Image (cartoon, helix red, strand yellow):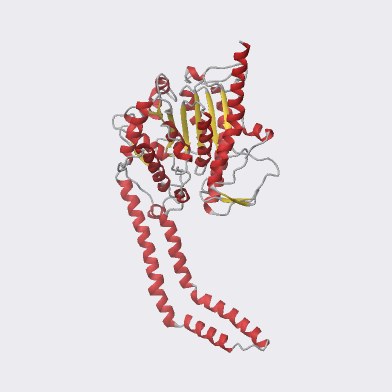
Amino acid sequence: MALGSSSLSSSLRFTVSDRPAVPTDTPASAQQTSSTTRAYSPRLRTALVLSGTGTAGAYHAGVLRALHEAGVKIDVTAGRGIGAVGASLAAIDGAQDLWGSTGLWQGSRTAHLYQWRPVLRLTARVLGLALTVLLLPLAAVVVGALASFVAYLLRVSAVPSDAITTAVDQVIEWALSPGAVLTWLPLVVAPALLLLFALQLGAFGVVWLRARRHRRIHGALWSTLLGSPIDAEAAQDWFVDGLWKLMRGGASVAQPDVKDLGQRYVELLSENLGQPGFRDLLITVHDLDGQRDLAFALLSEPYRGLFFGGETGSGPVNRSLEALDLAGEPGHCGFDACVAALSLPALTESRLVSFASSGSWRGETHRLCDRPDGVGRLLDEVARAGVEQVIFVSALPPPTGPHGLGSGRQDGRGRIGETLSASESAAERSGIASRTPLFQAVFEIRPQHNPLGPFDFRGCYDERSDRHQTLAELVERGYEDGRVQFVEPIIGASGEAIESGQTRS
C-alpha cells in the first residue's frame, strides 16, 4: 500500500553527524565524516542490515524483492535473528528463493514454525483427555439437571416428557454407578497418565543424549523434563532445507548433514566473492557460555584484515574470541551460527556449536542463540567491515503516541511475541541513534503498521482493518515499503541529482 508524505517522513530516516564520536578501534573507512547531509551514493560501500524475529523474515523478503528489482548495489548483507536467513541467501545471490512462488516464505511449511514443543502439545492433549474422563460423572449430573428443567417446562406446557425424564435418569444412573467409574479409571485415565509419563521420559532421554554428546548438563530433573517451551528445530530445518534447495539447483543430490552443508556454503561464497550477486556476509549471535556476542563474517579484502585485525575490550585476544573468520578454521561452524540465530534465549533450546581445537576457544562446545536487543552490536560490526552507508530493515513499526493503544494478546505465544517486539523496538531505536555517527548515511525501511507478532505465522486479526491478515500480505507490504520508502524517493532522487550534475558539467 502506498504511503503519504507524512508517513514517509516518519518511516524513513537518513542522517549524518557533523562531529561523529567514533571509537578509536573503528576502521578508518568508518571514520569518514561529512559536514553536510549526503544522499544515497552507489559508490559508497553499502550494507543491508536485516533485524527481527519470526515473521519479520517475511517483511525482509518483500524488501529484498524491491531492492533486487531496482538493482540496488549491496556490498554486505548482515543480520541477526530471522534476518540471518535473508542475509545468508542474499549473500549467494539467492534472495529470489525467499519471495518466489516456491520460496521459503510462500509455502505452507511456515505455519509450523516456532510452535509449542511437541511434547508439551501432547501433554496438554493427554491431560485434557484424562480430565474429561474424570469429569464425565459431573457432566452427566449437569446435563441431567438441564434436561429435568426442560422436561418440567414441557410438562407444564402439556407436552409429553416422560421419555426424556426416563432417558436422563438412566444416563445419570449409569454414569454414577460403581461399575462405570471402575471401568473409566483403569481403561482410560490410567493409560493416559502412563502415556504422559512415557512421553516426558522419552523427551528427557532425547535431550539428555543429545546434550551428553557435546557437554555435561546438570539441574533438577523436573526442569530438564519441562525444557524450553517453544520448538526452534522446525525453523532450523526449514532454513537448512531451503538453503540446500538453492545450492543444489536442479540436480538430484541427497542433502548432506548440516556440517557438510555449512562447509559447502562457505566454499561457494568464498570462491565467488566479488562476482555479481555475491556479497560479504556478517551474522551476529550471542554466546551464553562465553557471555559475549560473536560475529561470524566472510569478508573480501581489504576489509577482512581491518575487521579481524582490530582490537576490542582489553586487547586483540578478546577480538579473536568475538570475531570469527568463516574463511578460516571457524568456517566449519559458520553455518551453525546462522542456524543458532534462529534460537531464542530461554524460549527455545540453544544451539550447541563446537569450535575448532586450534582456535581461540580451544575446541570448546558453547550454547549459541540470538539476542533480540543486539542491534547495536550488529551495527558496530557492520562499521568495522568498512561500511559507509546502511539500509536498515525492520518489521517493527515506529512506536505509537497517545491514543494509539490496542487490545493486548491473551494467547501464550502472542504475549511472548509482544514482549519480544517491545524489547527489539527499543533496542533498535537506541542502537541506530547511537551508531549513526559511524556511517555517512543510515536509511530505515519499516512498516507504519504491522499487526503480526513474531509467532503469528498463520496470520492474526487486525483491529485497525477489522479482518484477518496473513503472512503473504506482510511479504507484499515489505515490497511496497521498499519501493515507496527507498527505491522511489532515495534511488530516484539520487539518479536525478547525478543527471543534473552531468548537465551542469
Above or below for 34 versus 207: above
Left or right for 159, reference 30: right
Above or below for 272 versus 212: above
64 and 406: which one is in front? 64
Left or right for 13, reference 129: right
Outermost residue to the right: 403
Q: Position of residue 297 (x, y in %)?
A: 41, 29
Q: Position of residue 363 (x, y in %)?
A: 30, 34
Residue 395 in sight in this render: no
Q: Position of residue 53 (x, y in %)?
A: 50, 41
Image quarter of residue 188? bottom left
Residue displayed at 56% across by 88% down = 163
Residue 218 in sight in this render: yes
Q: Position of residue 374 (x, y in %)?
A: 50, 35
Q: How many marks?
A: 0
Above or below for 178 versus 247: below
